[in-house]
Image (cartoon, rainbow, N blue to C red):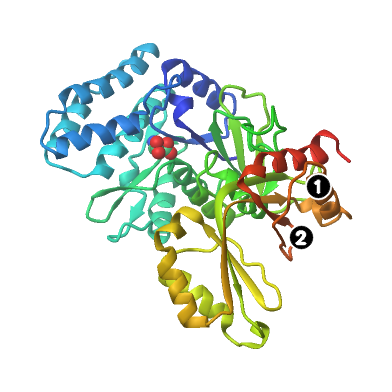
Amino acid sequence: MKKVVKFGGSSLASAEQFQKVGDIIRADKARRYVVPSAPGRRFDNDTKVTDMLYCCYEAAEKGESFKSKLKAIKARYDEIIHGLNLELSLDEEFQTIEEQFKAKAGKDYAASRGEYLNGIIMAHYLGYEFIDSAQVIVFDEDGSYNDDKTMEKLSARLQSVERAVIPGFYGAMENGKVKTFSRGGSDVTGSIVAKAVRADLYENWTDVSGFLVADPRIIFNPEVIETITYRELRELSYMGATVLHEDAIFPVRSMGIPINIRNTNKPQDPGTLIVESTCRQPKYTITGVAGKKGFVAINIEKDMMNSEIGFGRKVLSVFEDNGISFEHMPSGIDTLTVFVHQTEFEEKEQKILAELHRIVTPDLIDLEGDLALIAVVGRGMRATRGTAGRIFSALAHANVNVKMIDQGSSELNIIIGVSNKDFEAAIKAIYDIFVTIQL
Ligand code: ASP
């Protein structure tokens, strides 16, 4: 068995957290490849080391003094080193960082030092080999991640290494310039390492016990999802971003490697297992319900729309030309509605409307803003009759007016549009009918 384990910032924010991580790794011999984040928040209102680095580098770039800022960052690491009683000094590393900041090595270089230094401490603490991600994670000159080259380098490098620490979040271009993934990108590194070593499992350790059936800000103490498929997770992407970086699923998914979300502070909890497919029946008919406020519906009407070839394409080309992606597009015989993010749309509203009038000459366009979209997702829905019936009667009882319904042909999801103001009530009604009452 071979496992890749990634630990998020809050799991590595202090010496105490490092000790928990050490215990977790030592508890299972299969946990051979470790991907750490930078130290995160130790308490509410604390600052993540990554943010301290961005701020420090900003000062350096402006030619301002950044010594005290860098000192505060060093103090974060020294606190961990001393708390763990390690014989390790980062003085030389900080010397180099200071020089590189003065030489304006770049924002990405600056941010990457958070994981780099944490990786050095982690390797020292565990007695594992340290591998600098700049040597093995490859980016192209245009800044995009190069999977083929990375797989080649990383697999070759790790082949003879029994146990290693590979810092998350960054790699380098072939000219040596450091490049990071987007924020939260250590999740992506973990997934890449899991693919490179063909791991049996990618464990992603964070500060929650997995994905929740619904948002805990709306539902008190919601249930944890035990098993979810990659497709379901994509459908629930409205809720996914904070637990797992969206791009983290692609490398492992292509190899059929499951991801297990685990809680460093509650290692006894099984967490959520994300798999390609499963015959395990979900506990409830729905796997999860998630949503987001702030959409606008652009409703376009035109007589005989259904026989006008290319109508949909022309409508969508207007959004494409304006750099706006659409979320859903339910249609009727002579109507077509495009749902987009309101904030993005508002900036270009009049331009888009003018272009739509010019390109598709509709009879009418009307707009409805302040809408929320809710995705009810579950592989269990396919085998269950009456799911839609239950959802809509629950919504009716909660006095929620449904503005749009869209069921994917996969029967994996039902999308419901409601007013922003009804959003919380709708989520609660759906959660209660499937989970609390379990009708
Ligand atoms: N430390 C980086 C961030 O704060 C990357 C990560 O934690 O995954 O975004």
Q: Identify the residue under disc 2.
A: 411
Q: Identify the residue under disc 1.
A: 396
Q: Residue at x 45, y 19 (%)?
A: 43
Left or right, 256 with reference to 125: right
The front one of 414 and 295 is 295
Q: Is residue 167 visible?
A: no
Inspect the image, locate mark 1, and give the three-letter code of the amino acid beneath it: Ala
The front one of 433 and 35 is 433
Q: Is residue 208 above or below residue 394?
A: above
Left or right, 433 with reference to 100: right
Q: Is residue 133 above or below residue 327?
A: above
For the residues marked 1 and 2, what is the alpha-carbon distance in whole angstroms?
Answer: 22 Å
Inspect the image, locate mark 2, and give the three-letter code of the amino acid beneath it: Glu
Residue 401 coordinates in the image, percent (x, y) = 73, 50
Q: Would you call the spot at circle 1 few (<14 residues within 10 Å), some (14-19), or many (20 or more)?
A: some
Q: Residue at x 47, y 32 (%)?
A: 8
For label 2, being within 8 Å of ligand 1 is answered: no
Q: Is residue 430 above or below residue 365?
A: above
